[in-house]
Image (spheres, rainbow, N blue to C red):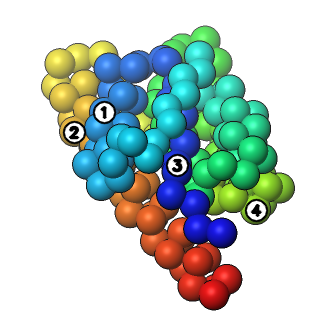
Amino acid sequence: MTHTRFAFVKAGWHADIVDRALEGFLELIPAAQVDVFDVPGAFELPLMAKELAATGRYGAVACAAFVVDGGIYRHDFVAQAVIDGLMRAGLDTGVPVLSVSLTPHHYQETEHHTAIFRAHFVEKGREAARAALAVCRTRAALAA
């Protein structure tokens, strides 16, 4: 069965940046084919991705987050847990789970850095859409 629907999950932290990934995704995949879900932060992405993938409704699930050093916790540990969880969600369900979850080495909440990452997330959203479409085409060809 070829799926024509996609799920896009986005974390609420730094929404002004993260939401741009959805914009890029929707440049290549029509909004009518995308169900959008919000979660509080990056840490909640893997569980939501797994639950959405397990429904069997989606050809792929894309997840977006921006994990930065907030000075309170080790952001690299959070980022690694998120990426590992997203990979496991895809492997456990057999549905591609794509990551637009970025962890910059250096980020400061300045106008300059925000502008750079907002633009970068648009491109990363496009890349996720291309990957979702490509993997769905390949899987459909294998099933034929």
Nearest to the eye among marks 2 and 3: give it: 3
SS class of the residue under badge 3?
A: strand
According to the image, label 1 marks what residue? 20
Nearest to the eye among marks 3 and 1: give it: 3
Labels 2 and 1: the sequence-earlier one: 1
Disc 3 marks a residue whose amino acid type is: Phe
- On the image, the x and y values in percent for residue 67 come to 51, 29
- On the image, the x and y values in percent for residue 13 come to 48, 17
- Quarter of the image for the N terminus: give it: bottom right
Q: CA distance from mark 2 to mark 3?
A: 23 Å
Side of 9 relative to 115 (left or right): right
Disc 4 marks a residue whose amino acid type is: Gly
Crowd band around label 3 with a 10 angstrom C-alpha radius: few (<14), some (14–19), many (20+): many
Crowd band around label 1 with a 10 angstrom C-alpha radius: few (<14), some (14–19), many (20+): many
- Quarter of the image for the C terminus: give it: bottom right
Disc 2 marks a residue whose amino acid type is: Ala
- On the image, the x and y values in percent for residue 42 come to 59, 28
According to the image, label 3 marks what residue? 6
SS class of the residue under badge 1?
A: helix
Whether residues under marks 3 and 1 lie with C-beta atoms below 8 angstroms apart, the answer is: no
Whether residues under marks 2 and 1 lie with C-beta atoms below 8 angstroms apart, the answer is: yes
According to the image, label 2 marks what residue? 119
Which residue: 70% across, 47% down? 53
Q: Nearer the viewer, residue 13 or 73?
A: 13
Crowd band around label 2 with a 10 angstrom C-alpha radius: few (<14), some (14–19), many (20+): some
Is 18 drawn above or below residue 88 in the view shown? above
Disc 1 marks a residue whose amino acid type is: Arg
Nearest to the eye among marks 2 and 4: give it: 4
Is 98 drawn above or below residue 134 in the view shown? above
According to the image, label 4 marks what residue? 94
Using the rendered view, name the quadrant where residue 114 is placed.
Answer: top left
